[in-house]
Image (cartoon, rainbow, N blue to C red):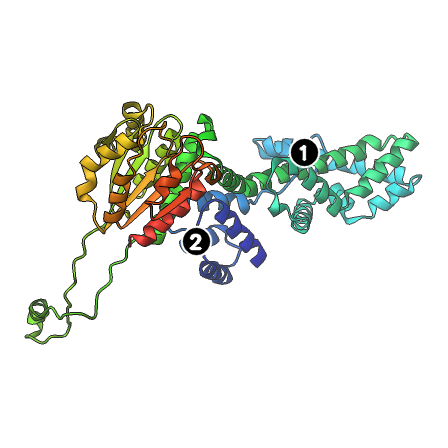
Amino acid sequence: MQSNLVGFIQVLRTHDVRISPAETLDAMEVTRHLGYADRNLLRDGLSMTLAKTPEEEVIFLHCFDRYFQQDLADFSASDTAPAAKTGAEDAARQSAAEQAAEFSATQMAALQLAAGDNAALQSLLQTPLMQSLLDNDRTDLTLAMNQAAERVGLQEIQMFTQKGQFTRRILDAMGEEHIRNAVIALEQDGSPALPVLQRYRDRLREQVRDYVEREYLLHAEGKNRQFMDEILSKTRLNNIEHLYLHKVHELIRKMAKKLASRHSRRRKLLKRGRLDMAKTLRKGIPHDGMMFNTYWRQVKKEKPQILAVCDVSGSVAAYAKFLLLFLYSLQDILPKVRSFAFSSHLGEVSAYFADHSIEKAIELVNWKYGGATDYGNSLLDFAKLALDDINSNTTVIILGDARNNNGNPRLDILQSIYQRARQVIWLNPEARRVWGSGDSEMLRYQSACHFSAECNNLKQLERIVDQLLKSSR
């Protein structure tokens, strides 16, 4: 039962529910006290242990109902058996059950008669699988199917192309090979019992296929989403088709949420430094002047700021879009962010993000500042707008391919920024091996940067933003 619980927790993790090893041990302790007899009680107990947010609780309840499904498979080969489920009155249900029992007895007699002349069928009728099929023992058959699925590792299924493979493995593990051999033997003999045995074989295969389909939807759904996220995070941003943009936006928000959780600031009460005597005395007034608690003066540090300068010309616009989307998804924990966009000229676009949604703001930025690239003129505009605001607490991020159409690169302005800023980071979407080729000024600009890196996919962008957050704490 513990392995069953661990499997359920693994399903939750593939659906982006964060569960630590300690919480897994807590869940095991809950199941030890509550047991598996009362399904609702177990669900409520595990929900309180494993789901930390309302969103996670919704995912938990959805996965719990699918993982601990109570319905038993119906392996009956009788055509009248389903009527027992659909009848509205007790008399009708009883009549249907009697017809099903009579039909099963007839089939049993036909098989036993044929077994007298067929050794393969006679051997088959002695197997536990065939006996359970003849009796429609749904509990034993469902348990056997679950055990076979566990033995063949069905919980590892990831792709829809594996469904047929796992179906065959489960059937083999249950002993369906004996039924196949008996069917072949009956075909060779031309036995009238052949359709009866084929009906049992087909019913068994149908139930196993349905079971594999349910397990695929349960286990592979989250894994496929994780696989797709991994593919998108390593794909060059300008190669991502429009069809997947909404998935990329969702992935960026997921990455930003993870980074926000990792780098969120925690307020700490200082216990050293210069004693704040006035506050200590004031807080002691309710205690007749007794200074039970001491308070210390805190040195107020100037908050850092980030200046994001993005090339939005045709060749780089897609990369700039995702960088801005990433930065503004982290605005709750990032220092103050000011954004600038340029192609032939540069302007500050921070107001666009204050007045519009992120996606709409990016569209307006691309529309206003897109065009041919002139890094020299754009750096001159940037110096006029923000050079005086750059100090030792400022990080300047420049995103661009540094291709200046053979114009004046104005390296002197970037060197001036380098001398004033805490750090200058240049992100270039082009491969490092082509830096400096053609009209690229990247090798010259690189000399005036604290850090420069190739950045053309979300995985690289996440890693760089992670380092940026560490350095700005």
Q: Quadrant of the N terminus?
A: bottom right
Position above or below: 306 against 78: below
Q: Residues within 10 Å of mark 1 (few under 14, many from 20)?
A: many
Q: Which mark is residue 81?
A: 1
* Residue where numbered disc 2 is placed: 50
Q: Nearer the viewer, mark 2 or mark 1?
A: 2
In the image, 21 versus 5, the foreground residue is 21
Q: Is residue 119 left or right of residue 334?
A: right
Q: Position of residue 298 (x, y in %)?
A: 16, 63
Q: Position of residue 442 (x, y in %)?
A: 39, 38
- Please state the total of marks drawn on the protein image: 2
Looking at numbered disc 2 in the image, what kind of residue is underneath it?
Leu
- Secondary structure type for disc 2: helix
Mark pair 2, 1: CA separation:
41 Å
| Residue 91 vs residue 1, the one in the foreground | 1
Callouts 2 and 1 close, C-beta under 8 Å: no
Q: How many residues crowd around disc 2 within 10 Å: few (fewer than 14), some, or many (20 or more)?
A: many
State the residue at coordinates (56%, 31%): 88
Q: Is residue 44 above or below residue 136?
A: below
In the rendered structure, the answer to whether residue 163 lies left or right of residue 15 reads right
The picture places residue 38, in percent across and down from the top left corner, at 50, 53
Local SS, label 1: loop
Between disc 2 and disc 1, whose residue precedes? 2
For residue 41, say whether it is visible: yes
